[in-house]
Image (cartoon, rainbow, N blue to C red):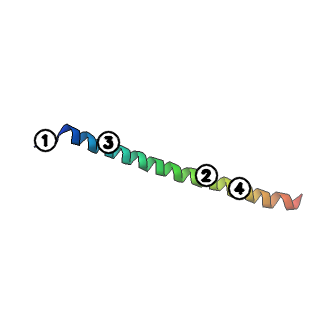
Amino acid sequence: MTVPHGTESETDREKLTREIRVRQKARNIALGLFLGGLVVLFFLLTIVRFPTS
């Protein structure tokens, strides 16, 4: 038995959207960690610099 072409392309499309979703999630996590690190760095610099001046 052969799989109809429409069904085959639908599963390919679902697989592609799943991969895109995984990539977006990974990118969001990386951006969140990066921005969180910048915030922590800013507060550390603020706490360390201003009391000494």
Along the polypeptide, which appears first: circle 3 or circle 2?
3
Q: Is residue 39 left or right of residue 24?
A: right
Residue at the extreme front of the image, as rendered: 6
Q: Amino acid at mark 2?
A: Phe
Residue in the picture at 83% in, 57% down = 49
What is the C-alpha distance between the residues marked 2 and 1? 48 Å
Along the polypeptide, which appears first: circle 3 or circle 4?
3
Where is residue 46, by image quadrant? Answer: bottom right
The mark lying in front, picked from 1 and 4, is 1
User: Mark 3 = which residue?
Assistant: 13
Residue in the picture at 41% in, 45% down = 20
User: Mark 2 = which residue?
Assistant: 34
Task: Name the element at disc 1.
Answer: loop
The N terminus is located in which quarter? top left
Task: Name the element at disc 3.
Answer: helix
Residue at the extreme right of the image, as rendered: 53
User: Mark 4 = which residue?
Assistant: 41
Residue in the picture at 26% in, 39% down = 9
What percent of the width, then of the height, locates residue 41? 71, 56
| Dot 4 alpha-carbon crowd within 10 angstroms: few under 14, some 14 to 19, many 20 or more | few
Q: Are marks 1 and 4 in contact (CB under 8 Å)?
A: no
Q: Are marks 2 and 1 in contact (CB under 8 Å)?
A: no
Task: Name the element at disc 2.
Answer: helix
- Vertical position of residue 9 compared to residue 51: above or below: above
Task: Name the element at disc 4.
Answer: helix
Picture mark count? 4
User: Mark 1 = which residue?
Assistant: 2
What percent of the width, then of the height, locates residue 37? 64, 55
